[in-house]
Amino acid sequence: MKKYMVILPVSAMTLFVSLPSGANAQIAVMEVIKAGVKKVIKAVDLKVQRLQNETIWLQNAQKVLENQLSKLKLTEIADWTEKQKELYSKYYEELWKIKSAIAYYKRVKELIQKQTAIVDEYQWAWKLFKGDKHFSVEELDYMEKVYSGILDESVKNVDQILLVVNSFKTQMSDAKRLEIINAAADKMDINCSDLKQFNTQNSKLSIQRAQSLDEAAKLKEIYGIE
């Protein structure tokens, strides 16, 4: 089976993962990806907390400024306000950026959690299919190839999400961030739908091959099919 080389950036480090053929190797690789995703989620949580603290500080500073201004006579502050116009402009721009960043990080966290759910779905199904006597070696090999294709696309989704996270360290417009996030979300939905549909087809095929009603009922329970 074709080998893949995954370059997965996680926070400040980069993971180089070789994807050889074989079910055990595939599961091991996805454990690495899951571990990396969990680190990203933790990093995002820390960033959100820090950004929220900065927002609170700026909001408190804003209240202090407004309170002080309200105590002054308009004639005394008119000239001062004009001189500080640029400073205020930068302040409100910074406040907007922080609030915007928090919104993006929360959205990114949701997508990363969805990506983790895709990995969990794959691991659950593949473990069951490997131990199911109703599938031949050739059929399991075919399943492995399909899963490899879906997981390869999943890794690309993770790369796109991390690109958005890292974009706050570089120049990127909100429009571009939103474009990347929406594209990754759409692809995740497709990956998840394809994976669930493939798993359902295989589960039903196993049930059809059951030798008795009792065996079929047991398989339905195992695969969660009513």
Image (cartoon, rainbow, N blue to C red):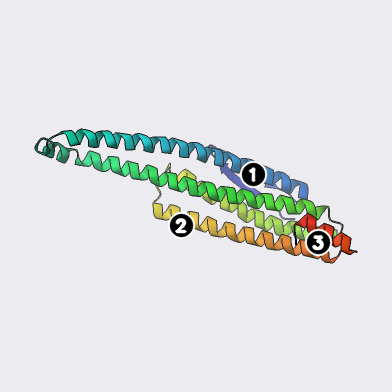
Q: Residue at x 75, y 53 (%)?
A: 126
Q: Residue at x 82, y 58 (%)?
A: 219
**Residue type, numbered disc 1:** Lys
Mark 1–mark 2 Cα distance, whole angstroms, equals 25 Å
Mark 2–mark 3 Cα distance, whole angstroms, equals 38 Å
Quadrant including the C terminus: bottom right
Instruction: Give neighbour class at mark 1: few <14, some 14-19, many 20+ (Cα, 10 Å).
Output: some
Does residue 27 appear in this view?
A: yes
**Residue 182 position within the rendered picture, expressed as x and y whole percent measured from the top left:** 49, 57
Q: Is residue 70 left or right of residue 63?
A: left
Secondary element at tag 3: helix
Instruction: Give neighbour class at mark 3: few <14, some 14-19, many 20+ (Cα, 10 Å).
Output: few
Question: Which comes before the other along the chain, label 2 or label 3?
Answer: 3
**Residue type, numbered disc 2:** Glu
Image height of 38 relative to 176, above or below = above
Secondary element at tag 2: helix
Give me the disc on residue 139. 3
**Residue 203 position within the rendered picture, expressed as x and y whole percent measured from the top left:** 77, 61
**Residue 181 position within the rendered picture, expressed as x and y whole percent measured from the top left:** 49, 54
**Residue type, numbered disc 3:** Glu
Question: Which comes before the other along the chain, label 3 or label 1?
Answer: 1
Work out which residue is located at the far bottom of the displayed protein and give it: 208
**Residue 32 position within the rendered picture, expressed as x and y whole percent measured from the top left:** 66, 42
Per the image, the residue denoted by label 1 is: 34
Q: Residue at x 43, y 44 (%)?
A: 102
Secondary element at tag 1: helix
Q: Residue at x 73, y 62 (%)?
A: 200
Q: Nearer the viewer, mark 3 or mark 1?
A: 1
Per the image, the residue denoted by label 2 is: 179
Q: Is residue 94 left or right of residue 183?
A: left
Work out which residue is located at the far left of the displayed protein and give it: 75
Instruction: Give neighbour class at mark 2: few <14, some 14-19, many 20+ (Cα, 10 Å).
Output: few
